[in-house]
Structures are given as structure tokens and as C-alpha cells.
Amino acid sequence: MRSFKTKGFGLIELMISILVASIIVAGLYKMLSSSWLNFGISSATARSGKSARQVDNYVNNLMFQAGFVNIKNVMQNRLYVKQQSKFGTDAAYYNDGDWIDGSFILGGTEANGNSKVKFRFYGSSLDDDLAGETDKTANGFIFDCRGQVVPNTVMLEVELSVNDDGLVCNQKTLVSEDGSNWDLDDPVIVDSNVKAMRILYGTTIYGRGGAFYPASSVKTHWPYINLVKYSIVTAQNTAQNIVKAQRGSTKTLFSAGDYVANSSPCPTTEVQDRLVYAVVCDQTVGNVQANFNSYQIPDDQLSYMHKVISGTVSLVNSSNFN
């Protein structure tokens, strides 16, 4: 009778097999983790880019309307007078809430990082007949926080700010000839991913281009502001562990030399016509406080992809040279 010997893996062979399998699994895990990390970062980058474009367009287009006065209102001398802000007295604004005569834009002090700005504008209508008998339907050129077109019978006060909800837009009715109410019950949430906003206010220095100031330096010279430079930080969650790489990281919000520090725009000589609204002023250019020019990524946002959106708005609609 023939006998058969059953032969299997020995202990050494088994250990070698386990080692090889472990190396293969570890390699696959590393590849998978790397792919998942890259996917999360790529996805966040794409969302961040889309968010940035939307925020930039919204802020730029809305703020560009600051100071707009329909031609009919200009001819009837319906310009901007001193009055109480409909948002009430607010220490975040350097003038404590009152609109200065001739001003159409106001900002916050350095204490709150200039994270608020408010401005006012008239709507625009098909009616440019000074007699006032023709169509007063809004022509679609001027919009409110919601994107609704505003007629020239209405002057709005708009506030852009950043809070726990992100970038929000609120508005109040300053003038309404037809009795319509444009106040918002709740602010419009423009983008919930916005974490910070800083704003500088500028004048056109004759022969030297623009010079920009923190709001606290503008003081009583708001009627001379015709440029706005903004920097906004958005954050998109990557769902990845990139804490170590970003700990202590900061984002620079403005370029060095963008500011005129510790002084006011000094309108000693004014060049005023319908093409140029300039303030001749000799100032020393310097840097503002470090905490104004930088945004430090908080520890609870280290896994977020942060992006800085910057832009400059020329307030060409300003109608304060009557």
C-alpha cells in the first residue's frame, strides 16, 4: 500500500507571505490615502475658486453702485445730505452712524478690522423726463442685496459685513417717494464660507494715482473717497488632515505700500469736474498694523483651504461735485 505525505506551508514561509502581503497592503493604503487627500484638496480648490468668483462679482458690482444718482435726480439736485443712518448709531463706524453731508460710503474702524462697510445709492429708471410724467419703471441698471432692480424713486442704504453666517448683505430704505419698503427682515447670506474682510478707502491723488487709508484715518473726509480696496478670506473644508502644514499660517491681505498710515486725506486743493474728482495731498506711504494686513488661520480651521479675494472698485458713480 502506497503512502502519501501531506505537505503545506512552513512557519517561515507563512511569515514571509504575511510580510509580503503587509507590504502590498501598506502600499495600496498609501496610494489610496494620497489619492483621497489629493481629491479633497482638488475639490476644495475648485469650490474655493467658484466661491471666490461669486463673492468678487457680488461685492464689486454692488459696491460700484455707491453714490449713484439717476440723471433726473441730479438735475433736480437730489444729492446726498447729512442724515441719520437707518442702521442706527454703531460704534463700528467712525462717525457713530450719521451720514456726513455729501458722503455716500462709510467704513468701520481698525478696532473691528474694517469688517463692515455701508454705502447708499439711488436706483435708476426709464424715466429721465424732468417733468416727471413718464415711466418710472426700474431699468435694471441698479440692484439691491437680493438682485432686485431699484427705481430712481428709492435711495437705499446697504451694509456689507462678516459674521458667523459668513458675508452678509443688509439694506434699509432711506428715501422712498412711492412709499415702498425695501428693508430686509433678514440679511442676505452672500457666502457662508467667508471668514474675514478688510477694506481700505482711497482718493485719487492728483498726478500720483490712488492712495488708500484705513477707515479711522479718513475721519471727516468721507466725501473725498472715490476708491475702495477690499480683501476677503474664504475657507473650504478639505475633510483632510492637513493640520500640521497650516499651523501658525497667515494670509497676507494687502501688498506693502498700499496704505497711507496715521493721517487723513488732506483735501487742501480739490480738482472737481465731471471727469476728475481728485484730492491733492502729500502723504507718507507706510504700512498699517500687522493684524489688519494679515489673517491667521484659526486652529479650528486648519483643515480648510483658504483663499484671499482682493479687488479695487472705482466709485465712478459718485455725484458729489455739485
Image (cartoon, rainbow, N blue to C red):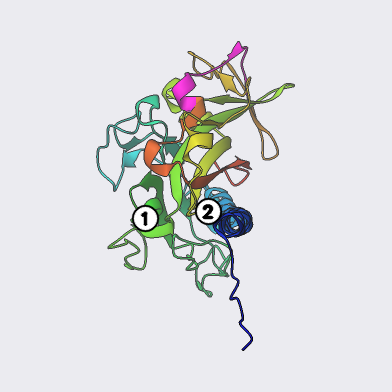
Question: 3 or 152: which is nearer to us?
Answer: 3
Q: Is residue 224 above or below residue 318?
A: above
**Residue 62's mark?**
2
Asked whether residue 264 appears in the rendered view, the answer is yes
**Residue 9: % across, % down:** 59, 65
Q: Is residue 298 above or below residue 32?
A: above
User: Disc 2, disc 1: CB below 8 Å?
Assistant: no
Could you tell me which secondary element the residue under label 1 belongs to? Answer: strand
Q: Which residue is mark 1?
A: 171
Estimate how packed mark 1 is, as few (under 14), some (14 to 19) or many (20 or more) residues with alpha carbons within 10 Å. many
Q: Is residue 72 magenta?
A: no
Q: Quadrant of the N terminus?
A: bottom right
Q: Judge from the rendering whether residue 56 lies leftward or rightward of residue 186; answer left or right.
A: right
Question: 244 or 137: which is nearer to us?
Answer: 244
Q: Is residue 273 above or below residue 184?
A: above
Question: 238 or 64: which is nearer to us?
Answer: 238
Could you tell me which secondary element the residue under label 2 belongs to? Answer: helix
Residue farthest to the left, as pictured = 89
Asked whether residue 46 appears in the rendered view, the answer is no
State the residue at coordinates (57%, 26%). 212
Could you tell me the amino acid type at mark 2? Answer: Leu
Could you tell me the amino acid type at mark 1? Answer: Gln
State the residue at coordinates (27%, 32%). 91
**Residue 167: % across, % down:** 42, 50
Q: Is residue 280 magenta?
A: yes
**Residue 187: % across, % down:** 34, 58
Asked which quadrant contains residue 61, the reply is: bottom right
Q: Quadrant of the C terminus?
A: top right
**Residue 9's mark?**
none
State the residue at coordinates (61%, 42%). 313
Question: 269 or 106: which is nearer to us?
Answer: 106
Boundaries of the magenta span = 279-292
